[in-house]
Amino acid sequence: MLLRLDPAVHDALARWAADELRSVNAQVDLIVRRALADAGRLPGDAAPPPRRGRPPASG
């Protein structure tokens, strides 16, 4: 999905994401989910956000 942001807004978003050890994409996902939940519009069948950090070791 293409998302057009003002460069200053993107920079602020990137700094915020870095402060929380997230990618910009993960930060946008978090913000959108919070906004949907606050508005009572988050679908009940929405998958949970991906877990942060390394995936568990297989084996």
Image (cartoon, rainbow, N blue to C red):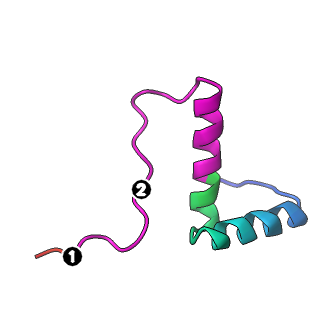
Left or right: residue 50 compared with residue 4: left
Is 24 in front, or is 40? Answer: 40
- Kind of residue indicated by mark 1: Ala
| Secondary structure of the residue carrying numbered label 1 | loop
Dot label at residue 27: none
Magenta stretch: give its range.
29-57
Q: Please determine whether, in this image, residue 21 is positioned above or below residue 2.
A: below
Residue at the location (89% across, 65% down)? 8
Spatial CA distance of label 1 from label 2 is 16 Å
Q: Residues within 10 Å of mark 2 (few under 14, many from 20)?
A: few
- Identified at 64% across, 54% down, the residue is 28
Q: What residue did someone put label 1 on? A: 57
Q: Main secondary structure of the magenta part?
A: loop
Q: Horizontal and vertical percent for residue 3?
A: 74, 54
SS state under label 2: loop
Quadrant (top left/top right/bottom left/bottom right) for the C terminus = bottom left
Q: Residue furthest top?
A: 40
Q: Is residue 42 magenta?
A: yes
Mark earlier in primary sequence (1, 2): 2
Looking at the image, is 41 positioned above or below residue 54? above
Residue 50 numbered mark, or none: 2
